[in-house]
Amino acid sequence: MSRPPSLSSRAEALQPSLTLAISARAKALQQEGRDICSLSAGEPDFGTPSFIVEASIQALRDGVTRYGPAAGDPALRRAIASKITNENGLPTTADEVLVTNGGKQAIFNLFQVLLNPGDEVLIPAPYWLSYPEMARLAGAKPISVPSSALDGFCLDLQALEAAITPATRLLVINSPGNPTGRVLSLDELQQLAELVRRHPRLLVMTDEIYEYLLDDGVEHHSFAALAPDLRDRCFMVNGFAKGWAMTGWRLGYLSGPASVIKAASALQSQSTSNVCSFAQRGAIAAIEGSRDCVRQMAESYNERRTILVQGLQALPGITLVPPNGAFYAFPQLPDGCGDSVSFCKKALEEEGLAIVPGGAFGDDRCVRLSCAVSRETIADGLSRLARLLPAG
Ligand SMILES: Cc1ncc(COP(=O)(O)O)c(C=O)c1O
């Protein structure tokens, strides 16, 4: 048999997704008939609201089945610009918006058009696992700045500033955050703005994809709206996946200075062209529609997040920073549990519990659990987890 073709150094360097490895193993065990309880989901457990589905079906019936402009349906770009202007308090025009295949492609495109080989990207940890890989794919170097569950996963501004070098190009901010579910406070964001002002070369990307998933009384603030003077250095990533339960639609957007949006659109035109045209009609219905459906889903995550948090807090030796957004909890395991990957493998093999190792998110002492599952699944998962922990 002939040898398989050798891969590019880019592909060789790519880290395979630990999350996917765990879910593949969980599926395989399930197929063997094992009773598997999965708290590993990274997506809403709701169907997409029907008025959004209907708008896309109507678009299909109306023949919206052709190529469209690479930067997105002009009506959707306008609707997103008006949403950012009115909801996020950031005056935005349609030419400052690019419609992308999910938030993921927004980040990928941005990194590709901003970063050069050797540039450094500052990523506060724990972080969403795709940021470092996407930085590497752009030839840049991800620099992780750790924080700890013991310190409430607060941004360590001193450490962040100390990590800035002449090569630092971009700072990544994700709030509400995956995996910690932490929402940055107004005060933290303002201090961050001060830090960015001290470093005139530094650009900022804020990933706001969980903006609607907030505990009662918690507010989301868009960084660029708080610091209008930094406007031309700020890029916002967002999407429809989490708020509107539209993960499979692949709809996201990037917003920022028009010149960079134009470059990202050119990149898109040479790679994926436009986002599915009739799916974009669904997105227009979503963004122009009432937020009632989004609020109802957020309320349901809040109830289930509380169950998950209370259950985790009752377990011996667990250190938990209670999440106040998104649909995850990221507890630190007690001493004696080993590294997160071995722990999660053991959890799956011994207890049939699928959870995600914190090592994938830059903190090997933690594991990520999702509350976007039924209350019964949460309770079942907590009992299985309890059996895996050293006796308290
Ligand atoms: C923090 C964060 N940003 C971006 C994304 C990408 O979302 P999308 O499905 O829109 O590509 C995810 C998905 O899990 C996420 O957790």
Image (cartoon, rainbow, N blue to C red):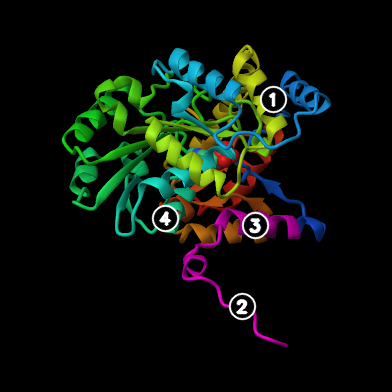
Which label sits in the foreground, 1 or 3? 1
Seen at 47% across and 45% down, the residue is 109
Circle 4: residue type: Ala
Circle 3: residue type: Leu
Q: Is residue 24 left or right of residue 82?
A: right
Q: Earlier in the sequence, mark 1 or mark 3?
A: 1
Residue pointed to by mark 1? 282
Q: Is residue 54 visible?
A: yes
Q: Earlier in the sequence, mark 1 or mark 2?
A: 2
Circle 1: residue type: Gly
Magenta range is 1-28
Seen at 54% across and 34% down, the residue is 71
Which label sits in the foreground, 3 or 4? 4
Q: CA distance from mark 1 to mark 3?
A: 38 Å
**Tag 1's secondary structure?**
helix
Q: CA distance from mark 3 to mark 4?
A: 34 Å
Q: Earlier in the sequence, mark 1 or mark 4?
A: 4
Q: Is residue 282 left or right of residue 262?
A: right
Residue pointed to by mark 4? 138
Which label sits in the foreground, 3 or 2? 2
Q: Are marks 4 and 2 in contact (CB under 8 Å)?
A: no
Q: CA distance from mark 1 to mark 4?
A: 31 Å
Residue pointed to by mark 2? 5
